[in-house]
Image (tube, rainbow, N blue to C red):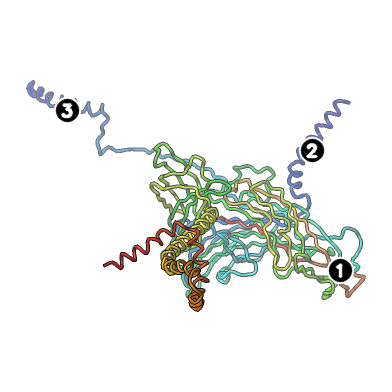
Amino acid sequence: MLSLKAKRVVAIVAAPLAGLGLMISLTGLSPASADISGSNATGSSVGTIPACSWHLVGVSGSVSLVHSDSSKYKGLDYPISGSTSSSVDSYVAPSSASSKPSSPQADDCSWYGNEVGAQITIATTGTPMFAASSPSSDTSMDFTLSDSFHKLSATVSPSCDAPWSTPAAGANDIYSGHTSAVATSLAESSVSTTSNCSYTVGFSVTVPGGMTPTNSGTTYVMSGPALTTTLVTSNS
Amino acid sequence: MRRSLNKYLRALLALFFLISPTFATVSAHAAGPSLGLAIDVLPSNDPEITRLTKSQSLWFVIAPGKSQYREFNVVSSSELTQQIHLSLGFLRRQNGVATIDDSQSPDSSSWATFSPNDFTLSPHQITKVRFTYTIPESSPVSSHEAFLFATAGSTQAASTAAFSLPQKARIATPVFLGVGTAEQMQTKFSIVDVVGKSLTSGHVIRIFFKNSGATPIELDGNVQFDSAQFTDLHVGPINFASLTIRPGEQSYVEVAAPLKLTEGRWNTLVTANQGSITKTKLFENKAITFKDPNAILQWAPRVLLVLLFLVIFIFSIRFLKKSKAKSAEKPDADQNEIPELLAAPEAATTPKKRVKKAAAKKPAAKKATKKAPAKKAPAKKAPAKKAPAKKAPAKKAARRTP
């Protein structure tokens, strides 16, 4: 057994050590070698909306042109006209949207800081003309759209609010040397996630008088210049 | 009776709600099926592309002898089965704006392939396409622009109408191809200047940029102004987005100047971004004025008037100097005339012989008198100018006296 003196010595040594231990435990200090067990890993998920793209719909595969009454070509000027059967729509929608949203919302898609402007053009290539496909190899009724007096008039009627542009009268007419024009456009700075524009196009042309059909009495099937409606997307 | 009517109305309403979604879809294109499509460019994972531009942009940076591809979806928005053809088109830039030129084909078209290239797209179908550029080994370092064309045509038989116009729908998306290594196709640009302009639409700020790199740039960013005179006066940041600036070109972006931005000295900070590259420039104590671009025209008449008056002034001074010199010569003439004038009354009193002698000398005297009237006129009109002429003999006398 320890003597009284020895006990006092132990007490003298233990007291400051206990005090120190108390201080350490109260102040929260922990030894550097202390093990940390368990983990507090955190996680989150970020939902995103689809990216936006420009879409073009409503371009008819073919536009029929007819005379105002049932009369036929008699060698005199013969005006014919027609229009697109549906409106041509250019609109912003989610990239993978395969049909035009009936009620577009601002949060349907996002440009994610990569807004692009849109420009709609109507163009043809080569020498614009009307050529007969039937009767075959009969060119007696063919005629070219040679100048601004012998042209295919294309009147674009947009139903789009500013800042969509509106074409000037005659801007989209088609004839030699004038085979491409802008129907409407929207600058990149004005693009939103619900931008859209619709327009219709009316066409008219006059079959020139003075031509003599080789196969008179038959119905000629004539095809005009192939028109391409292009939606040009651009950052500028 | 009323109960059965209510039942009938309810049934009618239910039927309406059932068919309304179908009705809404059909009404959008009630006139019949037509062509329709979209292009969805899939983002690039290439860090070099995302560093240079937005990952959705169709950008390629390819070293000679190498190839690279991007993918995109062709999306049908049509009720029709469409024939799709993919190609590259010529891109012409006019003042930074990309336009199509169907009469030419781009120089990079022979390096491009599409898989698939021509295909049939069913209604509302999506087809993924791989667009590959393969650059020949011998190609020099260069940059090329083009349009990616996705052209949709009808698969239906041609119209049998007497007169018809065949139509196609097309989507055009710009493509950039840089031939060279990533080091060779660096994007570099600098913020050159900030100036104010007064246009008919109002005051604007023009920020000038110089593209000194090898790739086109389309900058976005902002400009902010802190007054150099009033510490609490700040304007902006005002956001901007530039048109495409080609390598080597200098261009500007224009933003409307707020009313708070008055003429004076401003510390102007411009921040511009291209892809992940950000540049800033501080124009300290920059004098901002709003000059009318037609100021030269307005000043031109004033300048012309100044020039006109200056010419008149110079000519009149020279004229005055000359006339002064001539008037200085005239006293001699006067001196010659004085004896003649003095001799005249004497001649009246002298005998006829003297008169005849004088008549013999007449031709010489006549010469003098004939020239005299023109020269004399100013001398007579300006008696004040005669004063120095009168002094001349005195001077001559002084000269003679040693």
- The chain that hosts pointer 3 is A
The disc label shown at residue A209, or none: 1
Alpha carbon of mark 2 to alpha carbon of mark 1: how far? 56 Å
State the residue position of label 2.
Answer: B15
Rendered residue at 21%/28% (across/down): A21
Q: Nearer the viewer, residue B170 or B119?
A: B170
Q: Quarter-wise, where is residue A181 in the image?
A: bottom right
Q: Does A175 appear above or below A185?
A: below
Q: How many marks?
A: 3
Q: Chain of mark 2?
A: B
Whether residue A69 is visible: yes
- Residue at 40% from the left image edge and 51% from the top image edge: B281
Q: Amino acid at mark 3?
A: Leu
Give left or right: position of B73 versus B275. right
Amino acid type, label 2: Leu
User: Residue B50's spot in the image, x, y percent?
Assistant: 47, 56
The residue to which callout 3 is attached is: A17
